Amino acid sequence: MNLFNVYPLFNINPIKAQGSFLWDDKGEKYLDFYGGHAVISIGHNHPHYQTQLKNQLDKISFYSNSVQNELQTELAEKLGKLSGLEDYNLFLCNSGAEANENALKLASFHNGKSKVLYFSGSFHGRTSAAVSVTDNPKIVAPVNYDERFIKSEWNNIEQLEAVFEKQGNEISSVIIEGIQGVGGIMIPTVEFLTKIKELCQKHNAVLILDEVQSGYGRSGYFFAHQEFGIEADIITTAKGMGNGFPIGGVLIHPKFQASNGLLGTTFGGNHLACVAAIAVLDVMKDENLIENAQKMGEYIENKIKDFPHIKTIRRKGLMIGIELDRDCSEVRNSLLYNHHIFTGNSNDKAVLRILPALNIKKEETDLFIGALKTVLENL
């Protein structure tokens, strides 16, 4: 049997990782400035993370959600405290796409409506409803397409108001990323988010904040939308939540009522996943990683802002989009193959996406800064 070939692969095979570095099967060392799409939040193989997972393996690694699991309670309590959302409730699942599926479903159960508003440039996942609110026709199969899903232009208040004026009473929910990642690090304006919240309240629609990539301290706030003082009805999270262990979560405002069988999952919130997520929160708190994301992000921006070929820098914390005056692929490939540094791209071909671990150190950022300077000066 062969693998189903859906991923364009770099010819690199990492076999070991520590902190912000990877080593391949040839012994070459790489600086990880992308973290596998913002997944590696506390660095590879953090000692506390490793110890907690190994200890849990000696106890129990899995049982279904038909029994008590005190680790789920501990995770919910610690997540509530660190995020400042102690009055919300938590539903655990396995991924960001699954979190968004459950959020959309819960919203529809809540108000009995079926239409969903999403935005240009969005990416919410590849599963049924999640891909239907993702702005990429290439990955939306005919079975996923439905006129219930309405697209509006990013940061366009006038169009947003027009959509609600026409269809507001039919809209179940509005789903928006705290910061668009795949879209090219696109940051919503406070006016735009505030208007969405206002219209949702007016029309009994649910506001879903997709913080799958922009959450968990990535933006310099626990969730990116918290910078603007917006209260979401539902918040989804995943990527940095488990530092590589598959886990997702739906944070649910207390106005939503739970009932047996309303949502469900086989693997979500299993013992190993919870231990991984608890370890991440412990490290984030003990090592002040949200503050470090703010500090290191600002440091990187200040160092690179005058480099040649950079048009703009879009950044919150350590979620950084470097817009070049050309396709970024040449720069990305040079960083990878000539300087051994992993970076990312986006649907905007000119944007180089930077998502290092939240505990990145100054000397490690300097390696990236120096390499980027060399690459850009030699274009």
Image: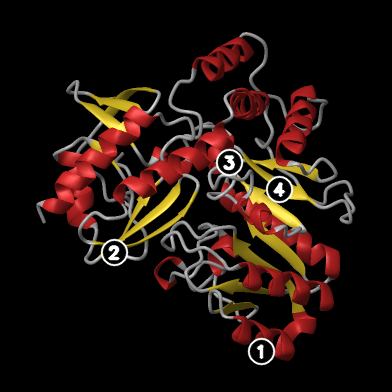
Q: Quadrant of the C terminus?
A: bottom left
Residue that numbered label 4 is attached to:
250
The three-letter amino acid code for the residue at tag 4 is Val
For this orientation, the residue located farthest to the left is 378
What residue is drawn where x is 72% and y is 57%?
A: 229
Query: Foreground: 302 or 207?
Result: 302
Residue that numbered label 3 is attached to:
217
Label 3: element kind: loop
Could you tell which of marks 2 and 3 lies nearer the N-terminus? 3
Tag nearer the camera, 4 or 1: 1
Query: Foreground: 167 or 186?
Result: 186
What residue is drawn where x is 76% and y is 38%?
A: 80
Apparent side of residue 271 relative to residue 31 in the rendered image (left or right):
right
Mark 4: give few (<14), some (14-19) or many (20+) Cα within 10 Å.
many
Tag nearer the camera, 3 or 1: 3
Residue that numbered label 1 is attached to:
162
Could you tell which of marks 1 and 2 lies nearer the N-terminus? 1
The three-letter amino acid code for the residue at tag 2 is Ala
Mark 3: give few (<14), some (14-19) or many (20+) Cα within 10 Å.
many
Residue that numbered label 2 is attached to:
350
Among the 4 quarters of the image, the one containing residue 167: bottom right
Label 2: element kind: loop
- Cα separation between marks 3 and 1: 34 Å
The three-letter amino acid code for the residue at tag 3 is Gly
Mark 1: give few (<14), some (14-19) or many (20+) Cα within 10 Å.
few
Could you tell which of marks 4 and 1 lies nearer the N-terminus? 1
